[in-house]
Amino acid sequence: MKKLTSLLLLCVAAFLMSCEGDPGPVGPQGPPGPEGGIFVASAFEIAIDFTANNGYEYIEPYGFDVYPSDVTLVYILWEVTQGFEVWRLTPQTTEFEDGTTLTYNYDFTDVDVRFFLDGTTDFSTLGSAWTQNQIFRVVVVPADNVDALDVNNLDEVLNVAKIDKIIKK
């Protein structure tokens, strides 16, 4: 009798699980995204002075939502050649004639990004060209999309991320 009851309960459960109601209405079309999925990114540009007073570092809150899985990419305006801006992905290191080095570097959390100088040179002896009005562009992208990008190419990252406006802070 136990086997018959178990079999009957199994049949009833299978019948109930196979029932399906009318499908609901189709939702509205979402915004178009790049081929391969959703890609949401934000960007800003900031000018920083590295001084002894700020410990040769600067911390900037994003000003928008960043998720723990997002990746922050930071580019430095390295030079302007014939009117064209040349951006380089950081960290970016320069070696001086005396063998010392200067590295523009960064780290990030999901609330802010920290820019800092690193290297073997004495930062207090650096000229203002190395420490004053350093321009950085910060781009935050979902981690799933970083593998498909040439992150060394700021223009490609902005193009794929469909970022046409960079907030100036």
Image: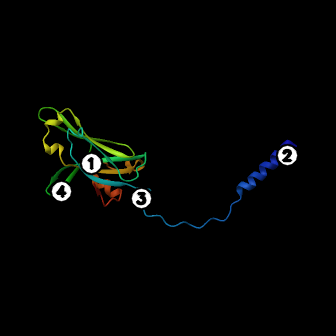
Of the residues shown, which amino acid type is indicated by label 4? Phe
Q: Is mark 4 on a helix, strand or loop?
A: strand
Q: In this view, does 6 lie to the left or right of 134?
A: right
> Residue 141, image x and y in percent?
37, 51
Q: In this view, does 147 lie to the left or right of 5?
A: left
Q: Is mark 3 on a helix, strand or loop?
A: loop
Task: Name the front one of labels 1 and 2.
Answer: 1
Residue assigned mark 4: 84
Q: Is residue 100 left or right of residue 139?
A: left
Q: How far apart are marks 4 and 1 (CA)?
A: 15 Å
**From where the camera sits, is residue 63 visible?**
yes
Residue assigned mark 2: 4
Q: Which residue is found at the position 85% from the left and 42% from the top?
A: 2
> Residue 156, image x and y in percent?
30, 54
Residue 64 higher or lower than 96, as above or below? below
Q: How far apart are marks 4 and 3 (CA)?
A: 30 Å
Of the residues shown, which amino acid type is indicated by label 3? Glu
Q: Distance between the residues labelled 1 and 2?
A: 71 Å
Label 3, residues with CA under 10 Å away: few <14, some 14-19, many ≥20: few
Residue assigned mark 3: 35
Residue assigned mark 1: 75
**From where the camera sits, is residue 148 visible?**
no
Q: In this view, does 49 lie to the left or right of 11?
A: left
- What quarter of the picture does the C terminus occupy? bottom left
The answer to which image quadrant residue 27 occupies is bottom right
**Disc sitting over residue 132 in the figure:** none
